[in-house]
Amino acid sequence: MEQLISFIEKAQSDKELMAKLDVLGEKDAGTDEIIALAKENGFTITADEIEKLKSENTADSAELKEDELETVAGGGSQNRYDPKSCKNMYRTKYNCVGFLSACWCDHYRKECILDPKKGKYSMTKRYWHSCTMNAFSKYKGDSDGRPD
């Protein structure tokens, strides 16, 4: 898993590598193509590691609590807004979250909705998804951005 994390960190600082990952992400490439790209860049990763990271990034338990946010250094974000492709969006897409949901667009926002009856999170968390560049209207959906 360490190699995969290092690969993601390199991609966040290497625009050429991130562009290659974006192409793979936009065409919904298989893990074999991702593994091959990682290998070209000197990283050895496995399909199991990719699947594990995908599940961690979409699991509710992967969310940071307020006190954990204080300890986070850096972070993977960038301006992924593209007027040509984003103007026709109606919901979150690869552009919003990047490779393995590890490099969110600076303009994408995801906010957990509290259960109004209980004043806390419900068992099936729902989120408000929005784009500060108005690529899509604010909508309610699941943690992956699928609309209700």
Image: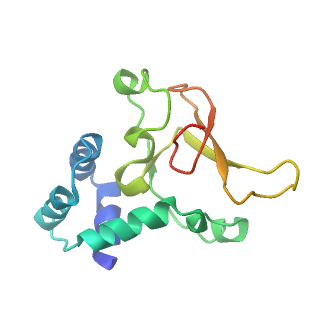
Q: In this view, does 98 lie above or below 135?
A: below
Residue at 29% x, 57% y is: 11
Q: In this view, does 122 lie above or below 39?
A: above
Which quadrant of the rendered structure holds the N terminus? bottom left
Coloring basis for residues = rainbow
Q: Where is residue 104 in the image (x, y as percent from the top left)?
A: 46, 48
Residue at 28% x, 75% y is: 3
Residue at 58% x, 32% y is: 132
Of residue 148 and residue 61, the one placed in the foreground of this image is 148
Q: Is residue 15 left or right of residue 117?
A: left
Q: In this view, does 135 lie to the left or right of 132?
A: left
Of residue 12 and residue 111, the one placed in the foreground of this image is 111
Which quadrant of the rendered structure holds the C terminus? top right
Residue at 52% x, 41% y is: 146
Q: Where is residue 141 in the image (x, y as percent from the top left)?
A: 60, 41
Q: Is residue 128 above or below residue 44?
A: above
Q: Is residue 85 left or right of residue 44?
A: right
